[in-house]
Amino acid sequence: MTTEVTGAGSERSPHPGPSGQAPDQRSRGGRRGDAEQVRRTRELSTGFIVSRIAVLGIVAALLIYALPPLIQTEAWTALGVVGVVTALVAYLYLTPRHIPAKYLVPGTIFLFAFAIVPIVLTFVTAFTNFGDGHRGTKDEAIRAIETSSVTQVPGSPEYYLTIAERDGELVFLLVDPDTKAVQAGTADGLSPVDGAEVSLTGKVLSAGGYTVIPTAQAAERDAEIAAFSVPTAGGAVKATGLSRAFEGKADKSYDAACDCVTSPSGGRWVADEVEGYFVDAEGKHLDQGWKVDVGFANFTKALTDPTISGHFLNVLIWNFVFALSAVATTFALGMIVALALHSPRVRGTKFYRIILILPYAMPGFAMLLIWRDMFNTDFGLISKLFGVHDWLGTPTTARLGLIVINLWMGFPYMFLVITGALQAVPRELTDAARIDGASAWAGFRRVTLPLVLVALTPLLISSFGFNFNNFNNIKLVTNGGPYAIDNSTVGATDLLISYTYRVAGFDSGVADFGFAAAISVFIFAIVATVSTVAFWRSRAQEEVYS
Amino acid sequence: MRIRTAGVIAAAGLLMLGVAACGGTNEPAATPSKDKGNGKLVLWTDPTRAPVLKPFAEAFGKENGVTVEVKEISENQQQTFITASQQGSGPDIMVGAHDWIGNMVQNGAIDPVQLTAEQKAAFHPNAIKAVTFNGQIYGAPYAMENVALIRNTDLVPAAPATIEDLIKTGKELKAAKKVQEILCVPFGAAGDVYHTYPLFSAAGGSLFGTTASGDPDPSKVTVNTPESIAALEKMKALGEKGEGAIKTSIGNENGIPTFVQKKCAFLISGPWSMNDVKKAGFGYDISAVPGFAAGGQAKPFLGVQAFYVASKGKSKVLAQEFVANYVTNKDVAMALYKADPRPAALTAAADAVKSLDPNAEKFVLAGANGIPMPAIPAMGAIWGPMANAEVAVVKGGDAKTAAEAATKAITAEINK
């Protein structure tokens, strides 16, 4: 396993079996003699059958689980895709062929489902105005506008309602609370009902020619009742629940001829397909909007809007400083501690290791909040130790504080991986260096560190990527602050990701997902570039040292 | 072999991609066909209210012969509800604060609720005002809350008549080493517009102008009016470079504990602090946050908890029945109060429980001058810039600069 850490050992070893198999199978290969023969018997073993049945059972269960909602929403294409993928997986694990695919396909499916698809969706969202007020389609916006404009017709009675039926057709039996007069409301309008028996609470108990529907059965016909309306001179009678009804009138209605929403009281809002709103002559829009494609508007806004682009560079610089110092400090401390505990002269290493891993094992959110409180000006531990100072309210100390907190949270991880990597460095190399007269420092600098780095560079790169987007630390400790008096948009400790979070309106509860997606694309581009360059350089390094 | 494998992987990948893409495009078109009533009512609420509401919801279910499911949403309830509603997996009824209304309406997530004149009259007028948005009532209120001044009566027997009195008493107690802080008002490093609003409004400050119908008007931001700047000046005088009554080191996380530990004699907080305060083991009383000696009254923000009917619910008529006709019932409101003692929005219920819990009544009295927290979506643009301006002046910054900067940021955000 230790050779796996360096990444070099497995590359060089000869491959007796088909490529892509796990190492343990390869080592077993030596014992198996006639590989074909053994494999056939192995595949028919109980373990084989049970595991195949389990895998296929899970796949089939997922398919059955996905069927009803897909059929209900009539998503036929998606249904077809799910079916084909399921069939493919079933085929793959039932046939003895395609052995590499058996190992690769599950991971690939997850890669697509949880990495590629979100990335693609983020890109797609970046070209829309998707966000609060622009979540649905235009039809949904129109429906919402019309529904929310329904008001009670002035002076109309607030009826008691009984749901009834005649000849299979839904009927509203309406009782006027003042006069106790009973009327029947059908799709054709209102008509008086004579001789109905009405309870004290206004429920119609029986009426000639009508069958009263019990509440439980009425509840079953919810959608039908919700859609039912009785036309009247002033508007229409609609149900308010199962026991009351009111005569209402929609103040706003959509007119397809002018593609606008009009109101009898004189309002007129024309559809603006660029903004995704109905806008009146003064430029004021109705609350409910819809999702439209905005092209590159979100991207150009990030680059040209002065309230956003004006701070972009400063945030970016601090973002790099934070991510690089986070990696450098945790790596340095992790290395020192790992080297100290690697020495054979240290006693009680297990005890020390457990203690050192504690910060890593504790829930990060809670630890960050505790650290924030430790930096409290008047009540915090740091103020008690080093004197009262507005630690998180001063840019320099707030930044230093964040790096310290991150160091505490992050070094145990580095300590763990460096300990692993150190154990893979062959003793004979360090011994040889010492015999050749190298000092302890030179031995470390020229032998141990390069070998450790070969193994750890990918981890350092991913650590950089993680800290570049270390949202939790910033959000929970300083929330980007301190802010300058004239600038509430960006604080001294904002990373691009926490800044995006605020600019996109998540903090204020009015989210602009389209814009947030555009900034995420920028962040993705930056991290991808840095990682690619770093990986490219580390590969060159690997060739030198291995 | 290798080529074939690559082909298989590519095919599987494309298929997965197809699933996601098609799932996205097919959803909206399919929405109308799934409004099938199923005799089942789903209600979403936060974890503290879920156990309280469950018995009431079940009683309603029994009464109407339907099944009712109460589901708790652990966090971010508003966004969760709006997102789920949009994709057709939301509830029939949502429970939440009234200041969500603006955002829920602009997303077409909730429907108006038609209350009769009689039903409306039964509620506290402020509660009805709070759930009214664009002239429509969007929810049935059931509890009201606002901040008040809570004081340790062992240290301060009589309620201060003005903020100046409060500061004077606080300073005397501090000088006598009886407390460490003059006043505990949650503010924190990020500022807190909500808790300090009584002080800001008492000093004459305001956030929005009002429309003809009395609603807050987002096109008239009043943060940089002379009155509001003067109010920020007063907050500066109370701040860290002045009296030291408002401090960034006291926030939501330590405001109530500091009061409970007798480190300050005054606390500005709401009914949610009562559980801790009752356990503190000293005498306490609740009164309205006073005004300044020269100036107006303190106007705390009123928050109202309400039931909403989801636009895209599957059992809308049932939901209407529950919201408009069931929870507006006095007996239900009283039972709700007993399970979750927050000042009731239904006047009859509030009167009935007055004798049971004097604190609830005191909070209602303290909120008599209060104004419902604006529910307009533009309110989202206010919190950040305004909190920043308050932090700046509390730390000794110039009030005018802070007000101008906040106004600029707010209007830019509103016109976005």
Image: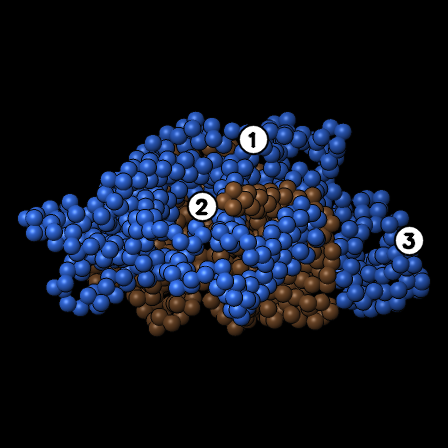
Name the residue type under label 1.
Answer: Val
Chain letter, disc 2 residue: A
Per the model, the C-alpha gap separating discs 3 and 2 is 54 Å
Per the model, the C-alpha gap separating discs 1 and 2 is 23 Å
Name the residue type under label 3.
Answer: Ser
The residue sitting at 23% across, 64% down in the picture is A353
Instruction: Identify the element where label 3 is drawn.
Output: strand
Please name the residue that numbered disc 2 is placed on.
A507
Instruction: Identify the element where label 2 is drawn.
Output: loop
- Marking on residue A191: 3
Q: Nearer the viewer, residue A469 or B260?
A: A469
**Vertical position of residue B168 compared to residue A287: above or below:** below
Chain letter, disc 1 residue: A
Q: Nearer the viewer, residue A222 or A68?
A: A68
Q: How is the image coloured?
A: by chain
On the image, the x and y values in percent for residue A119 come to 49, 42
**Vertical position of residue A300 compared to residue B96: above or below:** above
Q: Nearer the viewer, residue B25 or B41?
A: B25
Please name the residue that numbered disc 1 is placed on.
A294
Q: Residue furthest left?
A: A437
Chain letter tied to blue: A
Instruction: Identify the element where label 1 is drawn.
Output: loop
Residue A239 lies in quadrant: bottom right
The colour applied to the residues of chain B in this rendering is: brown
